[in-house]
Image (spheres, rainbow, N blue to C red):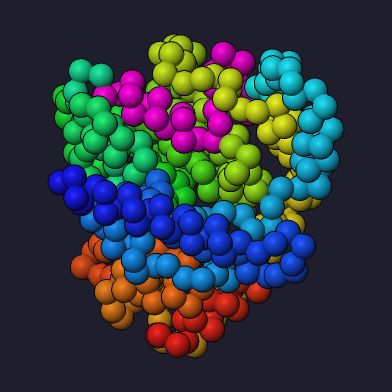
Amino acid sequence: MATNINRREWLKTSLLVTGALAIPSAFQKVDAKPYLPLVSNGSNVLSDAEIEQSILAEVAPVIKARLSANENPFGPSKKAKKAIVEAIDNSYRYAFANLQQFADNIATKEGVNRNQVILGAGSGPLLLAAAIYFSKGGGSIVSADPTYNSLPRDAEKSFTAKWVKVPLTADYKHDLDAMEKAIDSNTSLVYLCNPNNPTGTIVDNNKLKAFCERVSKRVPIFIDEAYIDYLPDPEATTLIDCVKKGQNVIVARTFSKLHGFAGLRVGYMIGQPDMITKLEPYCSRGGSISATSVAAAIASYNDKEHLQAALIKTNKSKEYLYSVLKQQGYDYIPSWGNFVMFPVNMDAQRFADEMAQRGVGVRSWKFAGKEWCRVSIGTMKEMKAFEEAFKQIS
């Protein structure tokens, strides 16, 4: 065991050193960035052996297109960047006032009370807080399979909950009927990601609202709306309306996607006041959001012009990706997010490795008896880099 651990650590260290050596001087003008393989994220967590294999297989000198993490390549708005710069001088102080203002802005816009809002450094800490709370005393968490598994995975692997996985429907959507049937006296939470990651599908809004109204009387429902800003009308689709009706529903949002804050880390959660009170001890309540990030979030929150521009560019790149897949004879799942999933004609991990060797990072999955690739939407330049690599191995 010690030998394996030492070898694994040596591989990781060697990779980091190699990556550091590959970083060009700040005075050089280059398009490519050093490539460090993404061996783990909130969707699939690799075992030690898989990490080792990934490090060996995915090492490439540079990455032309990082299409593996569902980031917004168009970045935060000009207003957000300006707010960051202006906030630096006072960043030696705790951002209590700005955090309060931001939470008040959310409550006002969403039509809820201030005591129904929790802030977080992205939605990750909020998902973890729910994983901890709803794992107390055992119980089970029901979710679709596959889905964004941060919350149910942590509840099962790190705490004491059982993860009940319900396969998606034939068209890769949440099977609400089957999920409802999976609920029993041990169920502590139902988790839904809508739009779903990694499939990009959405649930019929009327059916989902009816599901929440009915099921929330039996068990709390957690709705992860990380990608809702990519929908044509997010305000008409959000389940925050269920919260306002008094239902036992929790809704999580993040700025990591359309707002372009993946590295800035800002998110929030809305629920009933008593539920917020129960979850608060397990999260930092906004204290982990930096002064610069919260200033940027306040500036970006209602910047509809920037969000619309980013959405238009995302959809343009997505349509280009669709055309590339069609030209090569590949089917795909129509996506409502900033990523697209399609079945590949080889082992999915091998496909991802081959793409990485060509400087393009993508994600692999195995479900429904098929091998899958998930491609995050990048700039048009990045999508053309994907196309070039894809045509070489498709």
Q: Where on the picture, by quarter, is residue 200? A: bottom left
Q: Where on the picture, by quarter, is residue 132? A: top left
Q: Where on the picture, by quarter, is residue 331? A: bottom left
Queried whether the magenta region covers residue 242, the answer comes back as: no
Left or right: 151 as drawn, with respect to 225: left
Residue 345 is situated, as x and y percent measured from the top left of the image, at 30, 81
User: Taking 173 as reference, is 122 above or below it?
Assistant: above
Queried whether the magenta region covers residue 127, the answer comes back as: yes
Residue closer to the observer: 297 or 275: 297
Judge whether residue 66 can be spotted in this image: no
Residue at image coords 52%, 55% = 70
User: Taking 339 as reference, is 87 above or below it?
Assistant: above
Judge whether residue 40 can be spotted in this image: yes
Magenta stretch, residue numbers: 106-135
Left or right: 223 as drawn, with respect to 344: right
Residue at image coords 46%, 15% = 280
Residue 179 is situated, as x and y percent measured from the top left of the image, at 25, 42
Residue closer to the observer: 167 or 19: 19
Image mark count: 0
Query: In the rendered image, which quarter contains the C terminus?
Result: bottom left
Residue 379 is situated, as x and y percent measured from the top left of the image, at 65, 67
